[in-house]
Image (cartoon, rainbow, N blue to C red):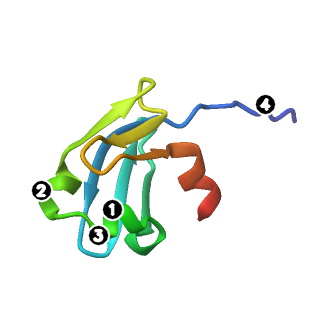
Amino acid sequence: MITLAVEVEPLAVEVACTDHSLNVVLADGREIAVPLVWFPRLQNATPDERREWRLIGGGIGIYWETIDEDISVESLLRLK
């Protein structure tokens, strides 16, 4: 039996922050949740500032302009 490894670039499609976590939904259906404490700028941001994100690079990263925070999806997968 031959198994083919398919390389899929993880792309974010949805982002949300709670008081304790950063939650990211990927295009392939996976969901990532990481502690907000890993990202001090996000942790110290107001709820409104946390909601003001945008996807960059077609979903390879997430950017919060107001607090100048930039997080790649790949880094979230490596941190787990």
Residue 59 percent across, percent down from the top left: 42, 31
Circle 2 SS class: helix
Q: Earlier in the sequence, mark 3 or mark 4?
A: 4
- Give the CA distance from mark 3 to mark 4: 44 Å
Q: Earlier in the sequence, mark 4 or mark 2?
A: 4
Q: Nearer the viewer, mark 4 or mark 1?
A: 1
- Look at label 1 and name its amino acid: Leu
Q: Earlier in the sequence, mark 1 or mark 2?
A: 1
Q: Nearer the viewer, mark 4 or mark 2?
A: 2
Residue 48: assigned label = 2
Per the image, the residue denoted by label 4 is: 4
- Residue at the image point whose x is 29% and y is 41% from the top: 65
- Look at label 4 and name its amino acid: Leu
- Give the CA distance from mark 3 to mark 2: 12 Å
Q: Quadrant of the C terminus?
A: bottom right
- Look at label 2 and name its amino acid: Asp
- Look at label 3 and name its amino acid: Asn
- Residue at the image point whose x is 30% and y is 51% from the top: 67
- Residue at the image point whose x is 26% and y is 61% from the top: 17
Per the image, the residue denoted by label 3 is: 44
- CA neighbours of label 4 inside 10 A, class few (<14), some (14 to 19), many (20+): few
Residue 27 percent across, percent down from the top left: 41, 35
Seen from the viewer's position, the closer of residues 60 and 31 is: 60
